[in-house]
Amino acid sequence: MAYRENWGGKTGSGGAASEDALGRARQARVRELTQASVDFANDPYVLRNHLGALECRLCLTTHANEGNYLAHSQGRRHQENLARRAARDARDTRVQPSIQKQTLRDDRLRKSAPARIKIGRPGYKLTKQRDPYAHQNSLLVQVLYPEIASLVQPRFRFMSAYEQRKERPDSRYQYFLIAAEPYETIAFKIPNLEIDRAEHKFFSNWDRDKKVFTVQMFFKPKPRPSQGIDPVSS
């Protein structure tokens, strides 16, 4: 049996070192050599987890100590992954300038494109009607677009009073908008009643020859509040 310096003991004590003590001494020596040869602080792929083990984020492997990670980092698998990562970074570096050039080119084209010039509001005519049989109010809207752009058809939509920012919102009203290039969008303030979309009650028509856009709408009547019936005693 060989007698060596007992790890953790006093020099010259002459006690025989146990296998555990020799293992701890070997690990400490490997750790010192590894830290001297590998800079873990600047290694972007090494991570110490909550158990004290080392993880390689490039290869997704776990290592019990520094010596094990050092052997892994010098192995073929880790070196091949490093080469792949370097090649991918180089490829991304070459692609990035082309993307930036295309973006700058698109911005210049967008800035150089002529802005759409509005030519003012179109002429219009409103006709209020009432159906005496159905007791419904209706509105006929006719808008004239003599200078409308080619292949453009007027579009319309309804807007709630809380969507617009021109007036204080009033729940009693809604807005009916009509748009067609190059004219400005016009809006009509109408009662906030349900539109009757039954056949022949709501329709739109675009006359390409006369350049007149027509919308006919009927409003459903407000429901009358139900009145209670007093019981009649016999």
Image (cartoon, rainbow, N blue to C red):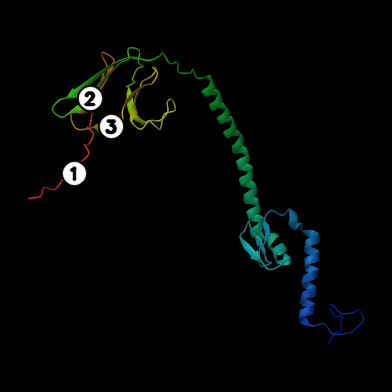
Q: Would you say 75 lies left or right of 12 here?
A: left
Q: Give the amino acid at mark 2.
A: Ser
Q: CA distance from mark 2 to mark 1?
A: 31 Å
Residue tagged 1 = 228
Residue 139, horizontal then vertical, whole percent:
25, 23
Q: Are marks 3 and 1 in contact (CB under 8 Å)?
A: no
Q: Disc number at residue 193?
A: 3
Q: Would you say 93 lies left or right of 145 here?
A: right
Residue placed most toward the observer, 139 or 172 = 172
Q: SS at mark 2?
A: strand
Q: Quadrant of residue 129?
A: top left
Q: SS at mark 3?
A: loop
Where 139 falls versus 9 (above or below)?
Answer: above
Q: Disc number at residue 138?
A: 2
Q: Give the amino acid at mark 3.
A: Leu
- Residue at position x 62%, y 63% from top? 61
Q: How many labels were placed on the picture?
A: 3
Q: CA distance from mark 3 to mark 2?
A: 11 Å
Q: Quadrant of residue 135?
A: top left
- Residue at position x 13%, y 48% from top? 231
- Residue at the outermost left position: 234
Looking at the image, can residue 203 be seen?
yes
Q: CA distance from mark 3 to mark 1?
A: 25 Å
Give the mark nearest the N terminus, 2 or 1.
2
Q: SS at mark 1?
A: loop
